[in-house]
Amino acid sequence: MNKLQHKKQRSNPSLGLFVSLLMIVASIGSVNAQNFGYIHRDSILKSVPNYLPKLQELSDNQKKYSAEISQGMENLQQKVSKLLQPYKPTEKENLVGIKARMNPIDTVKLNLLLDEEKSLKKKEESYNYMLNFTYKNEIQPILDKVNQAINSYAKKNRYDGIYILENVSSALAYINEDKIITQAIIDLVKNQKNG
């Protein structure tokens, strides 16, 4: 066999084309084999009884506590500034240096204000604990229940993934409406409650 005949046998163009087509068909088949669903998570959560009122109450309490602490700190800073004003503290002067120059009554007043600040910080910690406790005991169980329903539905219906539309909608140019499974998840969550 000469070199030209050997080259013809090695590079059969129809064989290369067949292999390329086979790879394209296989890759299209694997993409089509994936099954994804889409949900409107907000709609699901809104359908859960008491979710919105509990979330609103938590938000209202957080705002109320935050405003109370901020107002308390602001009042405290004003009292300290007013107390220290006659002593004209410099930027480099620390609290110990200022106290050394203060009369005994003002020193006691300053100590009381510092104790009030500690008390306010302790109150803030308590409020944060209460908010976290409420979230963990009233909101998180609802979120867990919804996530459990989503996982259960996905496994039962052989979904490879379920996307939350609120998170991905800006990146999607088109969605097959049949793949939006929000109502099915809502029904499953309701049945979990009743079951």
Image: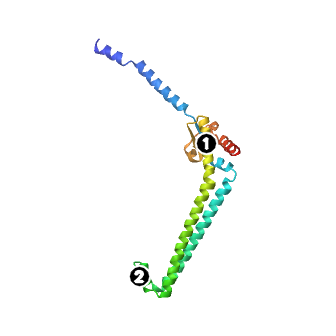
Residue 186 lies left or right of residue 80; in this view the side is: right
Q: Secondary structure at mark 2?
A: helix
Which callout, 2 or 1, points at the residue further toward the start of the chain? 2
Amino acid identity at mark 1 = Ile
| Circle 2 Cα neighbour tier, 10 Å, few/some/many (<14 / 14–19 / ≥20) | few
Question: From the image, which quarter does the C terminus lie in?
Answer: top right
| Circle 1 Cα neighbour tier, 10 Å, few/some/many (<14 / 14–19 / ≥20) | many
Residue 81, horizontal then vertical, whole percent: 50, 80
Question: From the image, which quarter does the N terminus lie in?
Answer: top left
Amino acid identity at mark 2 = Gly
Q: Residue at x 61, y 49 (%)?
A: 143
Rendering quarter of residue 91: bottom left
Q: Residue at x 35, y 15 (%)?
A: 9
Residue 101, horizontal then vertical, whole percent: 43, 86
- The alpha-carbon separation of the residues under discs 2 and 1 comes to 62 Å
Q: Residue furthest top?
A: 1
Residue 90, horizontal then vertical, whole percent: 42, 80
Whether the residues at callouts 2 and 1 have beta carbons within 8 Å, the answer is no
Q: Which residue is mark 1?
A: 150
Nearer to me, 8 or 53? 53
Which disc is residue 97 wearing? 2
Q: Is residue 142 above or below residue 9?
A: below
Rendering quarter of residue 137: bottom right
Q: How is the image coloured?
A: rainbow
Rendering quarter of residue 130: bottom right
Q: Secondary structure at mark 1?
A: helix
Q: Residue furthest right?
A: 194
